[in-house]
Amino acid sequence: MGFSTTAIHAGNEPDIATGAVSVPIYQTSTYAQDGLGRHKGFEYARTQNPTRSALEKNIAALEGAKFGFAFASGMSAIDATLKLVKAGDHVILGDNTYGGTFRLFSRVLSEYGVEFDLVDTSDVTNLEPAFRSNTKMVFVETPTNPVMTVTDLQAVSDMAHARGARVVCDNTFMSPYFQRPIEFGVDIVVHSTTKYLNGHSDSVGGFVALNDEKDAEWIGFIQNSVGAILSPFDSFLVLRGTKTLAVRMEAHDKNGRMVANFLAEHPRIERVFYPGLASHPQHELAKRQQTGFGGMVAFETGSLANAKKVLESVKLCTLGESLGGVESLISHPASMTHASVPQEKRESLGITDGLVRVSVGIEDIEDILADLDQALS
Ligand SMILES: *Cc1c(COP(=O)(O)O)cnc(C)c1O
């Protein structure tokens, strides 16, 4: 089946009780049991909820995974995934992950004895010397936020597997429509469904998709034991969102390319970060690994004052954190999403004070370009 057919039908069987075509919001905490030890497979809603199960089937199918688990946020999905490693284990972490992921490693997991090293995984030759005898996991994000660095998933998977380590990929930026990491050997895919999967800026959620039965059993056990589950209503929203994922991603991609080209030719812009531009250092890899480039574009204005001017002059684009919604959002990574990353680290990653990031929405492209044009002049 094609991607859109899967997106619309996987997990979306008509409701058994009523025939409802849209999966109902099973807003219940518990279920009536027929007798002692006899029930319909549902006992308590932290453990099982039909709306959440439908979403779990849906996104797992989109990622080409056997198992899927929906969480209350992207961070709780990532946290559950990291419960596959223990005190004394070592993780290789991409040096430019989402700020919250870096914070989870540096401030939380480090307190529990999990060791990690930051590595620029965009050059796989950096990876080899980072492996240790206790390396159990390589965690990457591609493309990265906000400078859109691309990591070769097949190369990383081959290298990690030869050393007995799992590979986790945060696929939030591309969504399974443009990139399916499992096809390149990645073991576990994580998502913030808050972004493109839900796509309408009205829900916070996370997801873990994987094929290994033993790891899936543990993630499911953690989901129930810790209880950071996605609510029935949010499950419904994301399930509604994925039905239009293909058309939305096509629109984000089309507009993203136009914005990147416009900025690349603008005299006031020093540099544009977008894997779809031929000038992007990993354009060829991005073409091989992704089927599109998406709607995330970052650009260098040269100074904090210039960035401030742009951010405060836009009228259509909304100043705010987050991304992946139908509306265009604009942000200042250094002071917003990456404020928790130390300044010198930020600068070495290219997250300067003059950097501006746009999550290009699916409004009419003429209106988006006109807004950026007036803000830049
Ligand atoms: C937003 C985001 C997260 C965290 O997800 P939440 O839903 O905010 O908890 C993780 N990774 C990436 C790439 C993100 O953009």
Image (cartoon, grey):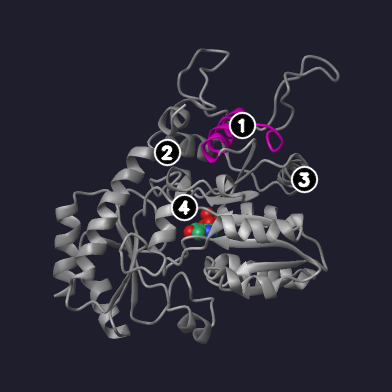
Instruction: Give, as a single range, the part of the protein colored magenta.
Output: 45-63
Q: Which mark is residue 53?
A: 1
**Distance between the Cα atoms at labels 4 and 1?**
29 Å
Residue on which the image places disc 3: 218
**Distance between the Cα atoms at labels 2 and 1?**
16 Å
Query: Residue at coordinates 40% horizontally, 50% vertically from top-left?
Result: 201
Mark 4 lies on a secondary structure that is: helix
The earlier-in-sequence mark between 4 and 2 is 2
Left or right, 106 with respect to 276, comes to right
The 10 Å Cα crowd at callout 1, few under 14, some 14 to 19, many 20 or more, is some
Mark 2 lies on a secondary structure that is: helix
The earlier-in-sequence mark between 3 and 4 is 3
215 and 12: which one is in front?
A: 215
**Distance between the Cα atoms at labels 3 and 1?**
17 Å
Residue on which the image places disc 4: 289
Q: Which of marks 4 and 1 is in front?
A: 4
Residue 280 % position (x, y): 36, 68
Quadrant for residue 298, please give it.
bottom left
